[in-house]
Amino acid sequence: MDGFEAIAASAVPLTGGYGGETYAVSAAGEDAVLRLYVRQPERAAVDVSLMELVRGLLPVPRVLDAKPEGSPDDPPYVLTERLPGANLEVYLQTAGEAERRRVGQHLGELLVRLSGMPFRVVGEFVGRELTVRPYDFGDLQQYVDAHVADLELDEKQVSNLGDVVGLAEDVLVGGVDRVCLVHSDFNPKNLLVDPDTQQITGLIDWEFAHAGSPYTDLGNLLRFCTDPALGGAALRVVREHAPGLGDPRLQDLGRAADLWALIDLATRRTANPVAAAAHALITRIADTADLAGDRPDLDVGPPA
């Protein structure tokens, strides 16, 4: 791209994530976002294709320019427009109950749309064609067995966690057997909101997106959520409008589907505060032998 060096020179690191590869820049007088792919260069092509695939269906940025291939010294990059809106994590700190409920409704609508974007098999995306390469880590119990040593739990906690995993597998068997597009990092840190209307204006950071369970993104949203106004509204919308997802155990299905990502994150507890919080949650789940892990019940009815 002509003038790329000038664009890169204007780069200011964006806060919120922990990758250190995303920057606010100015491109031809337009506010833009530059993402470098140093650690996962092969992911650049996937992200470009995903944003092109869902644009118009989900609030993702327009791709202004991209170099899908590169090297460690000259990494691939994707340059996108900068979407309007406030970071949802920041906005929720001062939002009132009615505003948080409307946010939850709009989040539920996004989850419904994601759940309706089908794929044939579970796996990671490869290349511009979004070929799906199936995962090879087995079922949930096999995955936990492969990672439990890194969680540094005691013998009783490991036994309790095994019981929870068995329960989670039973819950998931009772859910819908469908594969869809999964953002896989669907939480306030990666969402933008219009403070005046509570509409979601951006769903960003697609680096973990894959083909998977329609419950996974819901579970990610509910992972650290303690707000019945937001969480309850999202659950109601998904239950009422997502085909096949009206199960009364929807909250448990989301939490069960989230265990893969939660355990993976918990094994890296020293990496950042979110990973530390994930380890604390897994520890509570293991201590209580309960999928909720002392999290509140968010599946509440609408206000009277």
Image (cartoon, rainbow, N blue to C red):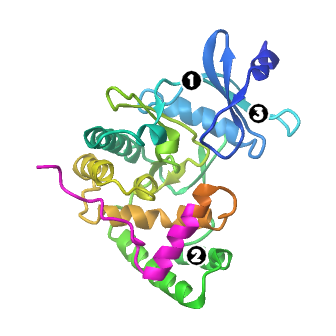
Q: Residues within 10 Å of mark 2 (few under 14, many from 20)?
A: many
Front residue (pair 297, 245): 297
Q: Quadrant of residue 133?
A: bottom right
Most extreme residue toward the left, as rendered? 304
Q: Quadrant of the N terminus?
A: top right
Cα distance, mark 2 to mark 3? 34 Å
Residue appearing at x 43%, y 37% in the figure? 91
Q: What number is the disc on residue 82?
A: 1
**Residue 103, image x and y in percent?**
33, 39
**Residue 92, image x and y in percent?**
40, 41
Q: Inspect the image, locate mark 3, and give the three-letter code of the amino acid beneath it.
A: Pro
**Residue 234, image x and y in percent?**
31, 48
Closer to the eye: label 3 or 1 = 1
Residue appearing at x 47%, y 47% in the figure? 187
Upstream in sequence: badge 2 or badge 1:
1
Say whether residue 248 is visible.
Answer: yes
Does the residue at mark 2 contact the one at mark 3 (Cβ under 8 Å)? no
Secondary-structure class at tag 1: loop
Upstream in sequence: badge 3 or badge 1:
3
Which residue does the numbered mark 2 point to in the structure image?
Answer: 144
Cα distance, mark 2 to mark 1? 38 Å
Say whether residue 134 is visible.
Answer: no
Which residue does the numbered mark 3 point to in the structure image?
Answer: 76
Residue appearing at x 85%, y 37% in the figure? 71
Is 45 colored magenta in this rendering? Answer: no
Q: Where does the magenta region start and end?
A: 277-304
Task: Check the image and report above or below for 188 versus 284.
Answer: above
Q: Quadrant of residue 7?
A: top right
Secondary-structure class at tag 2: helix
Task: Check the image and report above or below for 129 versus 23.
Answer: below
Q: Inspect the image, locate mark 1, and give the three-letter code of the amino acid beneath it.
A: Arg
